Image: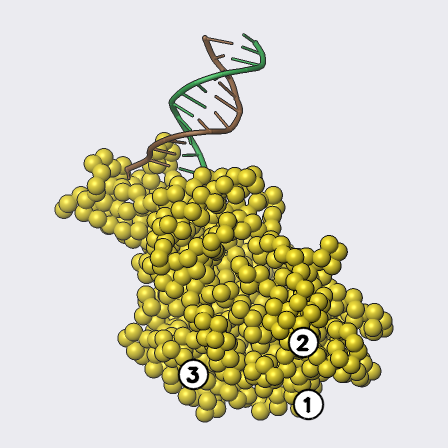
Chain colours: A yellow, B green, C brown
Amino acid sequence: VPDRVAKVLVDVALDREFDYHVPAHLAERVAPGVQVAVPFGRRETRGFVVGLAERSERSELKPIRAVVGKGPVISEKLLELARWMSVYYAAPVEQALRAVLPGVVRHRQGRFKERLFVTLRGAEAPAAGPAADAVAPGPCDRPAPDPTPALRLLDPLRLRAPRQADVLERVIATGGAYVHQLARAGPGAEAAVRALEKKGVVTVRKETETRDPLARHTILKTEPLPLMPQQQDALRLIAQAIDTRHPSVVLLHGVTGSGKTEVYLQAMDHVLRQGKGAIVLVPEIALTPQTLERFQGRFAGQVAVLHSGLSEGERHDEWHRLLDGRARIAVGARSAVFAPVCPLGLIVVDEEQEHTYKQDEAPRYNARDMAVMRGRLEDCAVVLGSATPALESFWNARTGKYALAAMPHRVDHRRMPAVRVVDMRVEAERTGRVSVFSRELLDAIRARLDRAEQVMLFLNRRGYATSLLCPKCGHVATCDQCCLPYTYHRQNPRLSCHLCGGLRPVPDRCPGCQDPAFKFAGVGTQRAEEAIAKLFPKAAVRRMDADTTATKDAHWHILREFRTGKIDILVGTQMIAKGLDFPNVTLIGVLHADLGMHMPDFRAGERTFQLLTQVAGRAGRGEIPGEVFVQTFTPFHPAVQAARRLDYEGFFEQEVEFRRQLQYPPFSHLVCLELRSRVEARAQFVAAALSERLRKELAPQAAVAAAAPAPLPKVKGWYRFQIMIRTRAMQAVAARLKVALQAARLPADVPYSVDVDALAIL
DNA sequence: AGCACGCCGACT
DNA sequence: GTCGGCGTGCTC
């Protein structure tokens, strides 16, 4: 047997593999995915075996000291995904691995929890003693002993020792119980257990308890529902993908209420019948007990939940339930895309356009894209579901990269509301100035308040931000570099870009139509809130945007207040539309649709359209749909017209056409490289040097923004600079970017992270 | 990331 | 003479 060499990733961000000698006594257990203890410099550290080799380039190798745990904790496919991620997002492999493996598994905290467990004598578990590292068998899957002798004891015991009788009764009924649970049910339970044990009626031993995050909920079992024809067609397409050897991604475009979840459930059932498992990703905001119950209700006991709200112990147990196959379905937020489901047959990404799928620290992966990549690596089916797909996803469906299943009808056949377009130019003409609220909208608000109904007002800008807009043609002044609308500062009139910090004097006529009327301070959510509160002093007005939801549970708080009727008018950015039904909302106003539609940054239009469809699908009382007002300066623009008809495809075509006219490549990639330092000059200097280097090394496939690296707002004492790279050859550029970053040997006190997005800003 | 080495100033 | 400040460099 030749000497074996293990390639080990040590848990330090060196972005390098280290070779170790595999001693003969460990050869059996050392395999890819296994955690090992290795000597490293003068200390010992942990690492993961990522590969094996016959020999090494180096002559002197240190041996692996020990194998940690029972077996591999990460599959070779997931290792491959981590490697791919580290290239694509230009992050060290170790960092990518950190995203893939939860901390509780890497650091082996949490562990299995052992508790005293009482059973009737003779009901001892088969020999599989659950050591801390071993597979933990549930306490329920053992043969039940004959309860007759114990039952006979019950009545005499009842007279003399009622507590013992209670305990015994419970143990007989459940087949076994944890001592701590019995103690919770009644006082003196511990003593009663001890007495029963002495009499030889029960046995007490240590048992691994699975911490169950859903334990407190009673879950009703549900049965598959009959499907409408559109659902049947979608399911057939997905089932086909599942049954193919190299399945393609299916984009499930289904309007709100078209029954997407039932399609997911039946597709998952199809996968389970083949002995495979599934992963369901839901956006964080949708990760409520109700959502989980829909999956739990259909696949009782097989579902593991993974999200940030779990305790370490719960996360540990849920993850291990998946690893050793006691659960085959993982439901969770973005990190659940790395769930150890094996074999994996299906990944569902619900509301795939949601931006919460993006990790906000390095590696800044998008879980939706990771799902697509994992699907390709593991040859499993991937379903992206949405009522309003991200434009790049629909583009992929259009160009044949994804298969498309459309569900255009609602299951409940509820009518969609009428969307009314309000021409703000007429309003400006009539009043002689540009107003925030049209008279029509104010009248409509008044009518709702009189009837004690609720109103949602949407504005795509937060804070006091005001922008410069032409009331004749609707042109909005945008930053040349970032294409973000400039913020207009009234005192000391100038325009400033909130992304790159650039400043510009105010032009004296409109660049679009040369009209000198080009001067208008628009509003952000904060000013809109103040204005509406002044106009309707008796109404309860609240604002919901990134500023008012900075604290952890602020989201839920505001939405709960709104739902329970404590708020009459909710003003906010598109986050006000998330997750919930608001039956008492009968009016929705989009204050300034121009800020979203037909703009170079396609995410803005996407957001406006998403809001319209999401809220429109939910507003109204029973059979009566709500009313939607869209205020705009460009009422006949095709994008606005498509929005009026809630016509996603029309809107999509319009966006693509708009980009074609402007000679922008439809959709490719924008890479934002962020460098930060505590010392401003240092960050600036390193960023400038790196930017220069990348401009040379990435050409001609990628364009590095020509100007000096853009400063970003200071965060928690960090000065930040951003280098923007545009490319249409993302995969190739990613690989070269990583090499260039390694070669640049950036100083450790200037950390960087890389964000990759479809080219929203052109 | 640790943990060395190493080269300077402040103390017993 | 030694203790200890943190800059620099290496870890199979």
Along the viewing direction, whichever of A552 and A418 lies nearer the viewer: A418
Please name the residue that numbered disc 2 is placed on. Answer: A472
Label 2, label 3: how many angstroms apart (C-alpha)? 41 Å
Check contact, mark 2 vs mark 3: CB within 8 A: no
Q: Amino acid at mark 3?
A: Ala
Dot 1 alpha-carbon crowd within 10 angstroms: few under 14, some 14 to 19, many 20 or more: some
Q: Residue at the spot x=55%, y=56% of the render?
A: A311
State which chain disc 1 sits on. Answer: A
Dot 3 alpha-carbon crowd within 10 angstroms: few under 14, some 14 to 19, many 20 or more: many
**What is the secondary structure assignment of the residue under circle 1?**
strand
Answer left or right for A134 relative to A529: left
Q: Residue at the spot x=42%, y=66% of the render?
A: A668
Q: Which mark is residue A624?
A: 1
Spot occupied by residue C11 in the image (x, y as percentages of width and height): 33, 35
Return the disc, 2 or 3, that comes first in the chain's sequence: 3
Return the disc, 1 or 3, that comes first in the chain's sequence: 3
State which chain disc 2 sits on. Answer: A
Spot occupied by residue A529 in the image (x, y as percentages of width and height): 76, 67
The part of the image, by quadrant, that contains residue A504 is bottom right
Spot occupied by residue A319 in the image (x, y as percentages of width and height): 44, 60
Q: Amino acid at mark 1?
A: Ile
Please name the residue that numbered disc 3 is placed on. Answer: A405
